[in-house]
Image: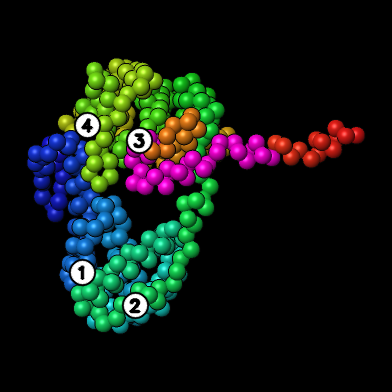
Amino acid sequence: MGRQSFDSKEYKIHNKSDKPDNIVKKENDIYLQCAAIEEELPRFLRSYFAYLRGNVLPMTRLAYLHDIKFFFSYLINETDLTQATETRKITSDELNNIVAQDINLFIDHCRKYFVDDGKTITVYENTNRSLARKKSSISVLFKQLYRDGLIEKNITDGFDPIRVAKPGEREIKALQDDEVMIMLDAVSNGTGLTDHERSYWEKTKLRDKAILIIFVTYGLRLSELQQLNLSSFNFTRGEFKIYRKRGKESIMPLNQSVIMVLNDYISTERTTVVPQTEADEDALFLSLQGKRITERAIRELVKKYTSIALNTSRRAGYSPHKLRATAATSLIGRGNSIFDVQALLDHEQVTTTQLYAQHKMNVKRDLVSDMEWELERKDDK
């Protein structure tokens, strides 16, 4: 059972579900973060909070609440639209006086803004995708306020549109099969690592290899892999259980490569690390400090090894989500059914999976290889 501090009190998770404690704890952590932000916002937003709890995923709810808190801070610090000095003291009457143009100016402010903490000035920039999310957060808020009769007009129709590329318009970034092999060679043999990186690689290479193999085999989401436990795996039955978004459970089959790398890691490297707490004892992937590996650490190791495969800088390496794309394109490229790949990757709509089917490996390279104008010109001489 996990323990955490909340309002300076100790609390204990009493888990009677079939979910492992770490999954329940993570869900509860998100709940507590949401509750903390709600405490900083006005009480008249309770129906908005209730709407989010019942209609969006927990992480989306948390993102929306962060957006609203930031919007209210903007009203206090950047405008004369409120007399409040704290976000919780903004009134419904003040929101009633806000017009669509005020929201459009806020969204424009979010494109690039500066935060001065007294020592450093940090520049924040948001992509159109992030701006669209912020606009959505505020649109839902003002629609809810209008439904509740707290404001007189639904101003959301006056919000400026934000152009966001459709999924089919975006270039799908994924490793090619030969790049996957370079990546796995790097984690197996230390190829392409700096001397500093090699000192850590000696202690974590089996763990890191298992992480990469699982990513490119199953296309797991980062949170799904990070929350894996030893007890998630039933090697006798050749399967393991993961917990998806929306609280779904999924049983995944094990292949021989995954069994091999997991056995190598569990029977050697993992035995040399002492779990820091009782909660860490069941964690599959541990840090050198004996704690469940963090999502940030996984992102960094994925960027490191994919950058070697791509022959680019560490900063330009791929994210775990692009290894999810790698699994999808590789599976479809091997002739597997789109519907089977959809089920494996847990896509809600098959149209999402179809995007990877449209992404033909090397198609651009194959096309331009037939257009060697200069080589043909020299051959004709």
Residue 192 in sight from this viewpoint: no
Instruction: Determine the main secondary structure of the stretch shown in magenta.
Output: helix
Q: Is residue 42 visible?
A: yes
Q: Which residue is mark 3?
A: 344
Mark 3 residue type: Leu
Q: Is residue 310 above or below residue 95?
A: above
Q: Nearer the viewer, residue 50 or 328?
A: 328
The answer for how far apart the CA atoms under marks 3 and 1 are is: 39 Å
Q: Which residue is mark 1?
A: 45
Q: Which image quarter holds the C terminus?
A: top right
For marks 3 and 1 on the same chain, the one whose residue lies earlier in the sequence? 1
Location of mark 2 (residue):
155
State the CA–CA distance, disc 1 to disc 2.
17 Å
Of marks 4 and 2, the one in the foreground: 2
Q: Number of labelled discs? A: 4
Front residue of this view, candidates 238 and 75: 238
Q: CA distance from mark 4 to mark 1?
A: 38 Å
Residue found 32% across the figure and 74% down from its top: 76
Tell me which numbered mark, 2 or 3, is placed earlier along the sequence. Answer: 2
- The residues bearing labels 4 and 2 have C-alpha atoms spaced at a distance of 49 Å
Residue type at the position of mark 2: Ile
Q: Secondary structure at mark 1?
A: helix
Mark 2 to mark 3: distance in Å? 42 Å
